[in-house]
Amino acid sequence: MKEKIIEKVRIGKRISPEEALTLWREASFFELGALAREVRFRIHPERIVTYIIDRNINYTNICISGCKFCAYYRPPGKEGGFVLSQEELFRKIEETLALGGVQILLQGGLHPELPFSFYVEMLQSIKKKFPEIHIHGFSPPEIVHFSEISGETIEEVLRELIKAGLNSIPGGGAEILVDRIRKKVSPNKCSAEKWLEVMRTAHRLGLKTTATMMFGHLETIEDRIEHLKRIRDLQDETGGFTAFIPWPFQPGNTEIDVPKVMPVEYLSMLALSRIFLDNVKNIQASWVTQGPKVAQVALEFGANDFGSTMIEENVVAAAGVSHRLSVDEIERIIRDAGYEPRRRRMDYTLIS
Ligand code: SF4
């Protein structure tokens, strides 16, 4: 059975969720890796690994969602909560540009009091001062929150954000796109269907987005495969996802007490994602959660992209995990693995 599925992948045929499950259960670690590598080179024949210089900017950590896996947020009124001032925001963007950055990843908690106009004005002010910066911002739960506080539809919210300068949307807040799991780990966050609706609408309006999966908490392997299936189905419909980023849950300082996903499981899941998502062009390695060595091995398990330099990263760091890499280090790690490092934009066009 396993052999037939491997053969199917080798000749470029799509596999079903049931076949993905069989591969997960029956293929060895190295079989999964070798197969994912083959798919990677079919899609990207050149020995190039891309990365982007950008900075994660969290405009607030105040959040009413209270996700059980989140070590970053502060409930309203609690010590340590902040909303970034315009001055701080501009300083962070200036530093990003000075380091050769082309993009900011702008995300925050679901703040109960800031009106929708706050976000629109934030984008307008950024674009006025820094017209060249690409704003990759507001994951689907934030967009749903804006829709709820403003009384506008998701489409209306997106249209206003695009008009104000939003360039693309990150795939955060997907966790596992199965409501049974979402109810346990993030009961106040938008449903799987809403997450997909935001992405579907964004794609229809011409925005590119990424997709993520945070795994290794309370879900089963069947749930992970269901998540991959929902991403693949939407991609068939819209073609709007530029990349898929699977990353393991970091349990430190959170309310979910489970053992950490180990590298073999991470790499196997990465490989299965590459094999299953035949319509998503790019798969990112997560050096921020895995560290540089595992991320280097990930390049042999289906990943063709090293993600971002993350000049600033706060969310994973709050869970007690902090890996830092400079541009030089990222390039050296990619070269040492036998690939040519290339800088890219959000849409994966190369920067010469
Ligand atoms: S993951 Fe996001 S939405 Fe959930 S508690 Fe943390 S900041 Fe809030």
Image (cartoon, rainbow, N blue to C red):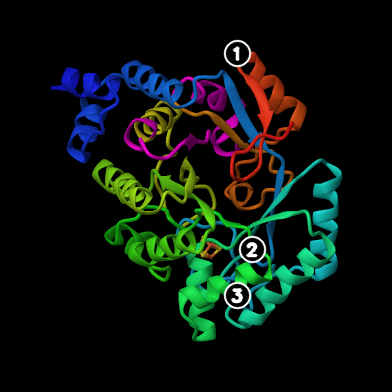
Residue 271 rendering spot, x and y as whole percentages? 39, 28
Residue at point 50% right, 53% down? 171
Inter-mark Cα distance, 3 to 2: 9 Å
- Name which quarter of the figure residue 32 lies in: top left
- Give the mark count: 3
Indicate whether 59 appears above or below 244.
Answer: below
Q: In which quarter of the image is the C terminus?
A: top right
User: What is the residue that sits farthest to the left in this orientation?
Assistant: 1
Q: Is mark 3 on a helix, strand or loop?
A: helix
Inter-mark Cα distance, 2 to 1: 36 Å
- The nearer-to-camera label among 2 and 1 is 2
Q: Mark 2 = which residue?
A: 166
Inter-mark Cα distance, 3 to 1: 44 Å
Task: Tell whether label 2 touches label 3 (CB within 8 Å).
Answer: no
Residue 273 is at least partly visible in this image: yes
User: What is the residue that sits farthest to the bottom in this orientation?
Assistant: 151
Per the rendered image, the range of residues in magenta is 274-301
Q: Mark 3 = which residue?
A: 160
Residue 36 rendering spot, x and y as whole percentages? 38, 24
Residue at point 84% right, 64% down? 129
Q: Mark 1 = which residue?
A: 338
Residue 114 is at least partly visible in this image: no
Residue 26 rendering spot, x and y as whole percentages? 21, 23
- Name which quarter of the figure residue 119 lies in: bottom right
Indicate whether 158 appears above or below 285.
Answer: below
**Mark 2 burial class by Cα count in 10 Å: few <14, some 14-19, many 20+:** many
Residue type of the residue flagged with mark 3:
Glu
